[in-house]
Image: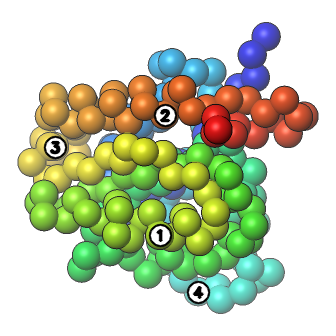
């Protein structure tokens, strides 16, 4: 029997409904269609008021502590953020400020972002990759960027976006191996 991959997805949008959340859901669905997974979604829009009011991890409400623990114990992270003035939001960064700096070492991370136009696509490489490099996480080679034109309201309507999602997932799969140890964490192939 194969182990189930613990996939934790973070939707960095401060609003609901959200194109970022729709992208996260599709990425999770695509991963689950080819691998056995247990998924956990962290929606920034749900926790933003309580998260923003807390400066120290020890003061976090139990619900947010649970989300941070899920992030820190993930086999695979799927992290998506809308673009705000050429970067992710301050609350998105604050969430990851509360994650232990050694918790994500070698954890594979599939990066994604949404924005109003294609001109923001470099946010994945210029903002998100450096953040997860600090954590010594392993950002996967293909990120997924989606612009407003890829959606009809809050549903993915673009064949090109579906193709980008499929490519990102297919390029990630050969890199994922279940750790032989009892931890159940995934590692990247050398």
**Residue lying at 21% horizontally and 37% vertically, measured from the top left:** 161
Give the label, 2 or 3, closer to the camera.
2
Q: Which residue is mark 2?
A: 172
* Residue 104 pos. (x, y %): 68, 59
- Figure quadrant of residue 162: top left
The residue closer to the viewer here, 19 or 35, is: 35
The residue closer to the viewer here, 179 or 59, is: 179
Can residue 14 be seen by looking at this rendering? no
Q: Which residue is mark 1?
A: 130
Q: Does residue 54 appear to the left or right of 25 in the view shown?
A: right
Separation of disc 2 and disc 3 at Cα? 24 Å
Give the label, 4 or 2, closer to the camera.
2
Point out which mark residue 53 bears. 4
User: Which image quadrant: the N terminus?
Assistant: top right
The residue closer to the viewer here, 21 or 32, is: 32
User: Which image quadrant: the C terminus?
Assistant: top right
Give the label, 4 or 3, closer to the camera.
3
* Residue 100 pos. (x, y %): 74, 71
């Amino acid at each position: 029997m194969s182990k189930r991959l613990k996939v934790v997805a973070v939707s960095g949008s401060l609003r609901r409904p959200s194109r970022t959340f729709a992208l996260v859901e599709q990425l999770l669905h695509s991963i689950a269609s080819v691998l056995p997974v247990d998924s956990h979604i962290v929606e920034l829009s749900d926790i933003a008021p309580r998260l923003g009011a807390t400066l120290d991890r020890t003061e976090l409400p139990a619900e947010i502590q649970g989300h941070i623990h899920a992030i820190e114990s993930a086999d695979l992270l799927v992290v998506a953020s809308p673009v705000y003035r050429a970067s992710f939001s301050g609350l998105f960064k604050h969430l990851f400020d509360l994650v232990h700096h050694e918790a994500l070492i070698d954890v594979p991370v599939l990066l994604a972002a949404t924005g109003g136009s294609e001109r923001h696509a470099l946010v994945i490489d210029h903002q998100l990759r450096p953040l997860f490099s600090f954590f010594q996480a392993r950002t996967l080679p293909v990120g997924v960027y989606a612009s407003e034109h890829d959606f009809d309201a809050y549903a993915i309507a673009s064949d090109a976006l579906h193709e980008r999602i499929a490519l990102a997932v297919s390029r990630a799969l050969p890199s994922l191996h279940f750790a032989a140890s009892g931890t159940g964490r995934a590692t990247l192939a050398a």
